[in-house]
Amino acid sequence: MPAYEDVVLGGLGRMASRCALVSAGPAQDATIFWGGEAFEAWLGVDPRGRAIAGLGEGLAQSLSEIIRDALATAEPVRSRCNRVSGGVVATTEILGLPLRGRTGERFVLVCLAGETTRTNLLKALFAATGHGMVAASAVRDPDGRPVDLQIIALNEAAAAMLGRPAEALIWQRVSVALPHLRHSAALALLFDALDGQQRVAFEVNDRAVAGAPRHLRIEGAPLGDLLGLILTDIDDSKARESSARLLFETNPLPMWVTGEDGRFLAVNDAAVAHYGFARDAFLSMDLSEIAVGTPAGFDGSSRHRRRDGSLIDVTAFTRAIPFEGRSARLTALVDVTSQRRAEARIVHMAHHDALTDLPNRVLFRERLMAAIAHQAAGGIVALLCLDLDRFKLVNDTLGHPAGDALLRQAAARLTACVPDGIVSRLGGDEFAILVGVPEREAASAIGERVIAALTRPFTIGGHEVCVGASVGIALAPGDAGDPDMLLRKADMALYAAKAAGRRTARAFEPAMEAEIQARRALERDLRAAFAASGLQVHYQPQRESRDLGIVGCEALLRWNHPERGFISPAEFVPIAEDIGLIGPLGEWVLRTACREAAGWARPVRVAVNLSPLQFRTADLAGQVRAVLAESGLDPRRLELEITESVLLSDSAANIALLHDLRALGVRIAIDDFGIGYSSLSYLRTFPFDKIKIDRSFTAALGSDPHSAAIVRAVADLAVNLGMDTVAEGVETQEQSVLLRLCGCTELQGFLLGRPVPAEEFRRLVAMTDIPPIAA
Ligand code: C2E
Ligand code: CA
Ligand code: CA
């Protein structure tokens, strides 16, 4: 760092005029204590004794910076210094030279290093912006009204937008210079702005000079009699706007623009087509005239009414937009009506039975739960479970379409029968009814009414069909407090009702629970008994009707229960069917009977009952063939008894199976003949070897003349078809005589011999000559 004395004493020569010496005190309060002539002229005031911080026009900042930097770096510093005065910026290059006095004081020599350049601030700003700037002055008529404007300043951007050089525009009348304004009311707007001393803004779209923008936005700001105009090229945004407009107009989605008051400001073609209103009609309405009911669905959809009155569900997508200078909303609409309908349909389907359209189990359970929850206030909730008696038979005899028709009619009757209840189809031929009742007895009365309603004959496809129903009733809160328990108890009551005989209504009783437990126990015992060979086969003779000689027998299952004694197969065979035991059980009966028969003294026939379910077990024919082979029984001595139901369900397959069985040489008998719907028609479906006339005909013989006629007709038919006939349940001598007269070839019944254990029947067969008939 040069010493102050060296510089000052060494002489700055000509440079001294352009310099100033600044002392930098400890507190940074730099002061000029000497300045040359040129420096003084530059500064414009006498520099001596002036504090740097006190200098105006921006000098304080620039000079302090230079001084500070020079002192801090102890190096010469070169920088620009700007002064602003009278709209002009003066820029000078300054050199700061740090010096040190002999006694350690510090100075900075500040020199004007170059020429000062001056710039017009306004021009600089004008030039810096891409906006066109025009300053114009009012031209007024003698009355003081503005008639035109004269351009007194403009920038290059304005010249470019107006498509002419600035020199050609300056001093021109605005009406001449701005072709954009020529054919519009724009000038008038500007005059208003001038007189009202307020800003205006508008757009003009006149065809301008080629190459200049077509769309301009013009803002005018008055300042006394001057008007500042800012021109903005809006060609780009106009282009965007027009493509947005095109997108709106041609959008396949209905779209509209509404004002803040809901009025339609614009609608597109799709909206016109979809809603059916003409554009004018649309534009004269507001949103509230087409919106219906609740403002929005849970998913944000709303409901609108079209011109033709039809309702549609729409999802609206809305956003705020400026529209013609106002705030508005643009809405696009997606019609979700069919989607909603499909959804509603699915929800309905999930909760209703397709066949009857009644609430299904799911919905019914919900309703039941709600009813129980509400009934806390008092009253009784009655639950009735019912199923149709003998429905399966109708289904099997007349076909599934008839079964369906029956279910539909039954559903309608139930609904009509309990108008204030909820009827549900739980599945198959099971229905349930939920109804509020004042007391227990009312529930039973409804049960009886329901049975009566379903007992009246149905007409289905020209057939008259009788079914009837069994009803189980459970009550809340008495029997149970929750829907599942209540359903379970009503089901138990139904079970009991069915067991008590058809067309019965039973209310739940705690004892039923015990009964069901007993049934479970019975199932267990039956399994155990079968496994432990606790079952036996008894044989009941079948005798020739004239000489009463034993020609055959029927093998009948017997179960001697350790606690309950003899249980009828009528009771336990259905249980075996239910628990899937009938297959092995039936095979065991067949094997036992064939083995037994193979050992008899005479070749009398043995008849074995086949459950319809055995027809579903794999290879029944193979099973019979194996049993015959293993027992060595002549196939002609084996007779298989089947019931009509074998021909009802899956009849084609079953008939084929019957033919297979017959092909083995065994005989096929049709059991319980005459109690079905169309017994006679079954005789055509398969050439049976024997018809077993049901006990009920035998029992009615003495009293009901029709019975005798039927038995005679069946016997005659059988003769013609080459079949044997056996009458069942013969208990009296009189029946025996009548049956013989009617033409029955064989008789079976207590009169002709009760079912007896194997050893006894063996002896019976051996005693050939004297037909042993109970007196
Ligand atoms: P079902 O085939 O009609 O058998 C005849 C039933 O009538 C037998 O009853 C027999 O004891 C009874 N019965 C015989 N004569 C008379 C009479 O004069 N008066 C009266 N009231 N009844 C008489 P059971 O043995 O109790 O058998 C009942 C039903 O159980 C049978 O009816 C049959 O459907 C079924 N069943 C019996 N054993 C078997 C078997 O091994 N397999 C299958 N699948 N079912 C069997
Ligand atoms: Ca039988
Ligand atoms: Ca029978």
Image: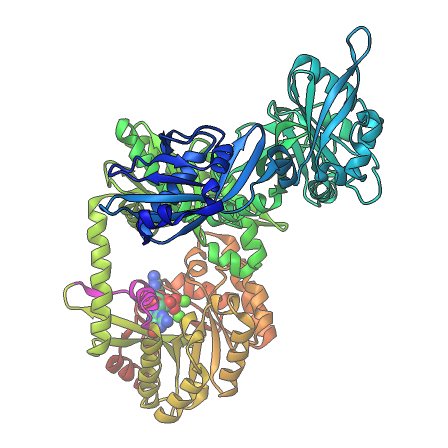
Rendered location of residue 623, percent (x, y) = 40, 85
Q: Nearer the viewer, residue 497 or 111?
A: 111
Rendered location of residue 652, percent (x, y) = 56, 73
Task: Farthest residue to the top: give it.
Answer: 143
Q: Quadrant of residue 160?
A: top right
Rendered location of residue 342, percent (x, y) = 57, 47
Give ligand 1's quarter of the image.
bottom left
- Above or below, comparing residue 45 to residue 382 in the picture: above
Q: Quadrant for the C terminus, please.
A: bottom left
Rendered location of residue 538, percent (x, y) = 29, 75
Residue 660 shows in this picture: yes
Q: Quadrant of residue 769?
A: bottom left
**Which residue occupies 62% across, 29% down?**
328
Q: Nearer the viewer, residue 619 or 289?
A: 289
Q: Residue 367 lies in magenta, yes or no?
A: no
Please tell me how many numbered marks the rendered image carries: 0
**Which residue occupies 43% across, 31% down?**
420
Residue 548 shows in this picture: no
- Left or right: 274, with 392 as reference point: right
Q: Residue 577 lies in magenta, yes or no?
A: yes
Q: Quadrant for the N terminus, please.
A: bottom left
Please, which colouring scheme is shown?
A: rainbow
**Which residue occupies 22% across, 45% down?**
103
Q: Which residues are magenta?
A: 564-581
- Left or right: 586, with 403 as reference point: left
Q: Nearer the viewer, residue 629 or 326?
A: 326
- Above or below, comparing residue 278 to residue 751 in the picture: above
